[in-house]
Structure formats: structure tokens, C-alpha cells
Amino acid sequence: MSIAVAAGVMTALGATLGALLGVSRRRLEGDDDALVEAVDHCLPQTQCAQCGYPGCRPYAEAIAAGEAINLCPPGGPDTVQSLSELLGRPAVALAEPAAGPQLALIDEQRCIGCALCLDACPVDAIVGAPGYLHTVLPGHCTGCELCLPPCPVDCIALTPRAA
Amino acid sequence: MSIDRLALAPVYRLRLSAYGTRLCPVVGDSERVLRHQLLARGRVPLHAPTSGRVRHGRCGTMLHLDADGADAALPCSPLADWRSLAPEELIEAIGAAGIVGLGGAGFPAAEKLRAGCRRGMEVLIVNAVECEPGVSADTALAADDPDAVRAGIDALRRILAPERTLFAVAPDASPFDHDAMEVLVAPEGYPAGFERTLAEAAAGRRLARGEYPTDIGVYCQNVSTCHAIGAALERGTPLVERVVSVVRVVRAAAPARNLRLRAGHAVDDLCRQLGHHGPLRAGGPLTGAPLDAGGGIDKHLHAVTIDETTEALPCIRCGACAEACPESLRAETLYRLARAEHYDELEAAGLADCIECGACVPVCPSRIPLLDVFRGAKAAVNARTARRADAERAARRFAARRTRLDRRDARHTARVRMRKSRAPRSWLDDGS
């Protein structure tokens, strides 16, 4: 008799707690945005699209949805490590090897002042105007390489930056 | 306790990039100089340790002095009537003599004194507690030349005007004639000679994190620094030489040898004269960092260590390092995280609070070079923080650019709309 009572109480308790859990899961959904923010914070913000996504934020959203964490060469192994720590996923080797910190340099003798690279830079690190000499601000350049393709005279080179 | 003197080195290598800044040489390449002559200006002036010919290093970071063996000195005169000078004038003289803290850290003495005067100090502690086991440079010098030490203490008292002056000694030290100064017996064990430990003993309470002894009115100066100050004022000699302890760390530790060494003594020549053919560490057996054989010893170096211990074994998580840590850090956790390069967790676990005293090193049964690991991890964390800051800046500029482009597009759209609404109807227009 007492066993039946005990079993009944435990079943009722289990059912109540299970129901509570189910309700709270629906009512208190996790903030997806916060996760994407945290992932984005780990990324180097070069907006270079080397990962295959058009910027760091889209890649962060993809990672939150399950994309691989080793697609960012400018971030280097450090970014993979941070993401691995954050998400609890294993830290794997980079899909493409990191080139190290780089700086874009405009060859002033060859620059024709066409202003095509100014628009290409995602962080406005190139100063200049049509018909005037363009130059890269070293403090702001992230080495994302997006200015190289638009240049019609191929006068921009990437140089390794002293750490 | 005798102090030996080594033969002069053939070359002295003096760093110009030091104290977080670059010193500016005032002597040209191939110029002949005398001992005590000013070689470079800057945050801490640099003086020639011996006579010879100066060579400029290739990158402007080093001065080489080829000794001529004569050791001819620039005549030095004491600072006239210094006991009646104003504190600021004394501080100027101390700064001009290129004096830095000789307890191990090498902080510019004049800057520390100015900061102390601004804040107002209540207690002056003369630190004669050797900072590391095996090192006896301070006590040897204090016993050898007490007059200069006393002069230095008098100068500090004149500058800081403290209410109390304490003479800090190790519990087992032989007595020093300290002119009836109040004696502070340092607590047992390591790191008793660190100024934090002494300030806490004097104040009777623990310092909070980030609190310095000068924040609570306690000014701590090493006794060798007092000697340098006294020598500068009484004899006019700038800081070019100090007593350095040579400590051997072998299976059975031998007592240290104390040597008078000039600033910049070439490290390879030092190894040769000591008869040692392996790596030499700058500092005592606990805080020692590797010395570059192609360099020279810094003018504030208090000891060198000859380390012959064997290779490290894996960590067995015994926790002896955490027990030994004076800052109560979880050393075994920090080691595990540092080796795994988990830098976020490392920062959270308190790596920045490590004072790099090295107390965790000798207690490790696996002989792991914990201090080297923590120093490397700190460098990596700093590099990471710098990269994060760069990324933040880039993200802000990216967002600002987006705003600029959106505004430009909006203006363009508005302009087009306005033009369309004003344009006369074309003759092709069907009126719709």
C-alpha cells in the first residue's frame, strides 16, 4: 500500500516537473542574437569574405547555425580557439592557412587616381579623391585584400605587417 | 662577506631601448670616452662603465663600448653642501646620476621619489632583506660601504620627510649598524624582500589588489639604491657599477659569490670568466629570466643564476604551486590553461595578478619552468588583447561606412524623386 502511494507521488512529481520544463522551454527561449554577437566578437572584423560569407556578421550568423569554425584565415588559429572555447566545439586546423597580419601598400608611381579602391575598402582605410593620389592609412588597414581586384593598374601590394 | 672583482670585459653592451623608451646617445661613433662620462640622455641617463671607444649599434638600440683596459675615470666631485639642498634639487641630482631601483625591478629612482613627494610619505623602509634565497648582494654591500648607505638614507629622509624610518632585515640576518634606526624584521619565507610584503608588515594589513605601497604612504627603497644615491651625492659618481650575486643552482646549492660588476658587462665574457659554458639567467634562482649571450648585463641586475637542473616532467596536478603562490592564484589551473592556450579562461583565472615571483618554480616535483610558461602566456594574452582592440576599431569603421553609404543613397534617391516631380512631361507621355 505505501509502495503504491510512494510510486504515485513520484510519478506525479515527475509529470509536474516535466510539464514545467516543457512550458518554460517554450516561454523562455534563448536569445539567438546574443550568441551571434558573441561569435562576431571573436572574429577579426576584416569583412574580407575569405570565409565565403559577405562579411563577418553573416559568417557569425552561419556559425551560430552550425557552420564550421575554421574558415577565417585572418583570424588565425587564435580565432578558432576562441570560437571553440565559446561554443564547446572541437578546435580544428584552419581550412586555409593564415597569412599573418598584412598591410596594403599603394605604389604611388603607378596609381592613376581612379578612386575604385576607395569604395572597395570596407573600413574606409584608403584616403584620396578622383584624380588625386590615393594612400592607405596603416592604422586602419586590416589586410582584407578587397582593394586589390578593383585596381585597373594592379598597383596595390600586400606586405607583411610587423606584429 | 667578501666582494670579488672580475677582470674588465673587452666590450660593454649598453641597451638604449630601456625603461619603455629610447635613450638618445650624446657621443658619436668611434668617440673615446672615460668612465662616468655621460653616454646617453633620456628617462634614465646612461654613463660609461669604463674608458674606451664607443660604437653605435646597427639599429640604434645598443651602444657598444670597447674597453681600452686603462679604466681611466672622469674626475667626479661631490655635490657641494647637498645636505642643505631642497628636495627637488636632490631629486634632480639623483636622476642625473642615472640611478634606478637596485632591488631587482630597476624603476627610475627620481620618478619614484617625485611621486612619493607629491603624495606625501609617512614611512620610509630601507630594504636590506635580500629578495631571493641565495642572493647576498645587498648585505655584502651594506657591510662593505656603510658610509655611502647612511648618506643615501639621509638624503631620502631629507627628500621625503617621513615620520618613521624602518630598516628592514631578514629574520636571520647579521646586524647592521643602523644608527639606532627602528628595525623591521621581515616575515619568514619568500618573497619577504618584495616591497609589498614589507609594506604590509609595516602597515599591519594586506594591500588590496592594484594598491601600491606608496598609495598608503609607505616608501620602500633597496639598500643598494641608497648606497648609489649616497655615492652620487658624496662622491659625485653616477651609477655604473653594483654588486651582483652569482648563484649556482645545482643538486647541492653552493653559497653565492658576490662580484662588483660594471653596467653592460658582456654576457659571453661573464660566462667565460665564471667558467660556465651553458645558459645564464638574469636574476636569482626564482625570478631568473634567460640572458642573451650577445648582450650585456643591465645596470640594475642584482644577481645571475647558473642553472643546471634537468628537463621537466608532465604535471601531476599535485597543487604544490598553488600552495606556494603568495597571491593565492590557482597556479596549476593557470599552467593547464596556458599550455592549452585557452586565453579567455586564462584571463578570467587571474593570470594578470601573477607577480612573477617564481615561488611556484622550486616546489614543482616535475621541475616545470612555470614562470617561463606564465611569462609567455602573458605575452600571448597581451597580443590577443591588442588584436581584439584592432578588430573593434575595424568594426566601428565598417558600421560608420555603412551609415555613410546609406545616407548617400538616401540623398540620391531623394534627389531623383525631386527631379522627376519637377520635370516637364515629354511629348511621348500618354498623360498617365
Image: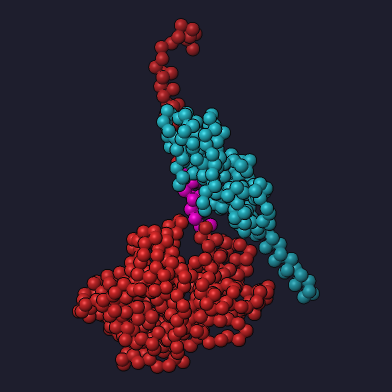
Chain colours: A cyan, B red
Residue A149 seen in the current view: yes
Whether A35 is drawn above or below B297: the answer is above
As for residue B391 lying within the magenta part, the answer is: yes
Residue at 46% across / 92% down in the picture?
Answer: B172
Residue at 32% across / 83% down in the picture?
Answer: B148
| Front residue (pair A88, B173) | B173
Q: In which quarter of the image is residue A149?
A: top right
| Front residue (pair A156, B265) | B265
As for residue B289 lying within the magenta part, the answer is: no
Residue at 58% across / 85% down in the picture?
Answer: B253
Q: In which quarter of the image is residue A18?
A: bottom right
Whether A49 is drawn above or below A39: the answer is above
Q: In x, y percent, where is residue B75? A: 29, 74
Q: In x, y percent, where is residue B272? A: 54, 75
Q: On the rendered structure, is B239 left or right of A53?
A: left
Whether A61 is drawn above or below B409: the answer is below
Q: On the rendered structure, is A21 left or right of B232?
A: right
Residue at 51% across / 51% down in the picture?
Answer: A162
- Residue range of the region highlighted in magenta in the rendering: B384-397
Q: Classify the position of the N terminus of chain A by image quarter.
A: bottom right
Whether B197 is drawn above or below B373: the answer is below
